[in-house]
Image: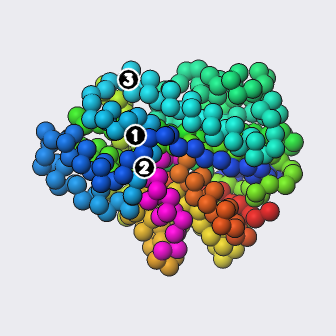
């Protein structure tokens, strides 16, 4: 696919905000990659040639295990929209509650002190939205603002956190809870002849992340600014197709080469939008969509091989959880000791790149 030029990235945040807390959560079920490969081999038994041609992705994905919302045998059974979404609702609510309460507690707040909630989720349908379903149970005030966001995909961790900071900056002193929760594994499809279906089976895991942001006050880091880059005419690079049995993943083989060709320019635009030169960035904090994506980022930005070690660690232990994954990376980066200036990046459907600039407090 020929890279397409897009509009310049536009800054999203008008004044710095504090990241008061960050919490993550995963479902209780987990599966090792060897078991996942054997179960997939059985499940794709009617498409042996397809599986055999692509089975190496399990071995080369850089994943040791993943957390999943259903028992392993569930994925070898047939499920329609209703069954899949029922699993999504039950699991997403549980993950949301765990991550949100932990983030609020870490911020030394109580749920009734939260003024607004931004929810990012793209792997199921919830109407009323997840934060509305859980508000009373969590103790969120009835007059708290709610901003549910659907469709950001893997970019949701960065762009959702940026949206939360922008809302907090528009009303200094207000406290916003951001929650990203995804149940990617329930979209695994055994009825498809699309190679992307096998790739998804080798990559997808489930999880959630939550954070509290406020304009003013001390926190884990300062959110300085954010920007997005959308390339036109790239909708078929990544996303979902809506089909009768459920969502079908769209993964184009062009993703890694597209990143190699386009990321450096996108990062330069994002940094210009937030007023920072490239040499001011001490470290990137990237969504690890897969080993080839991590390799492509390192190549595009001329990083030393292995520079994105935390990203590889998160991918190995959790797989690709879509939006929350970059928050897992940030959590480990903070635990290690946040560098002076960090640029978070993630790619998502559109095709888009989100960027968020953080500074150590």
What segment is highlighted magenta in the picture?
306-323
Q: CA distance from mark 1 to mark 2?
A: 10 Å
Residue that mark 1 sits on: 185
Which quadrant of the figure has residue 109?
Answer: top right
Which numbered mark, 1 or 2, is in the foreground of this view? 2
Q: Horizontally, is 233 left or right of 307 in the view?
A: left
Looking at the image, is 222 positioned above or below residue 152?
A: below
Identified at 87% across, 42% down, the residue is 173
Dot label at residue 83: 3
| Tag 1 secondary structure | helix
Which numbered mark, 2 or 3, is in the foreground of this view? 2
**Residue 208 in sight:** yes
Dot label at residue 164: none
Q: Nearer the viewer, residue 239 or 117?
A: 117
Identified at 47% across, 30% down, the residue is 88
Q: Is residue 329 magenta?
A: no
Looking at the image, is 92 positioned above or below residue 228?
A: above
Residue 282 placement (x, y as % from top left): 66, 73
Q: Is residue 309 magenta?
A: yes
Q: Say which label, 1 or 2, has the lower sequence index.
A: 2
| C-beta proximity under 8 Å, tags 1 and 2 | yes
Identified at 62% across, 22% down, the residue is 133
Residue 157 placement (x, y as % from top left): 58, 48
| C-beta proximity under 8 Å, tags 3 and 1 | no
């Amino acid at each position: 696919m020929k890279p397409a030029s897009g509009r310049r990235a536009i800054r999203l945040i008008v004044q710095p905000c504090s990241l008061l807390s960050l919490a993550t959560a995963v479902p209780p079920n987990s599966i090792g990659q060897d078991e996942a490969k054997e179960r997939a081999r059985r499940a794709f038994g009617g498409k042996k040639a397809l599986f055999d041609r692509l089975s190496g992705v399990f071995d080369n994905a850089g994943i040791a295990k993943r957390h999943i919302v259903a028992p392993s045998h569930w994925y070898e059974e047939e499920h329609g929209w209703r069954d899949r979404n029922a699993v999504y609702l039950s699991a997403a609510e549980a993950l949301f509650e765990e991550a949100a309460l932990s983030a609020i507690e870490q911020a030394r707040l109580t749920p009734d002190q939260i003024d607004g909630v931004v929810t990012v989720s793209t792997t199921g349908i919830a109407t009323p939205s997840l934060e509305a379903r859980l508000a009373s149970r969590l103790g969120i005030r009835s007059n708290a603002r709610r901003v549910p966001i659907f469709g950001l995909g893997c970019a949701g961790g960065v762009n959702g956190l940026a949206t939360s900071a922008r809302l907090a900056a528009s009303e200094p002193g207000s406290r916003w809870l951001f929650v990203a929760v995804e149940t990617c594994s329930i979209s695994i499809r055994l009825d498809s002849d699309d190679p992307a279906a096998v790739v998804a089976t080798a990559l997808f895991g489930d999880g959630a992340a939550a954070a509290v942001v406020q304009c003013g006050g001390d926190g884990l880091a300062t959110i300085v600014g954010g920007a997005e880059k959308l390339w036109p005419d790239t909708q078929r690079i990544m996303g979902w197709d809506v089909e009768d049995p459920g969502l079908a993943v769209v993964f184009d083989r062009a993703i890694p080469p597209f990143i190699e060709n386009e990321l450096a320019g996108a990062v330069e635009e994002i940094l210009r939008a937030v007023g920072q030169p490239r040499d001011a960035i001490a470290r990137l904090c990237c969504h690890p969509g897969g080993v080839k994506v991590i390799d492509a980022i390192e190549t595009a930005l001329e990083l030393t091989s292995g520079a994105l070690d935390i990203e590889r660690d998160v991918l190995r232990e959790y797989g690709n959880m879509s939006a929350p994954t970059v928050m897992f990376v940030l959590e480990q980066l903070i635990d290690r000791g946040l560098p002076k200036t960090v640029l978070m990046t993630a790619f998502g459907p559109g095709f888009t790149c989100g960027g968020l600039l953080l500074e150590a407090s």
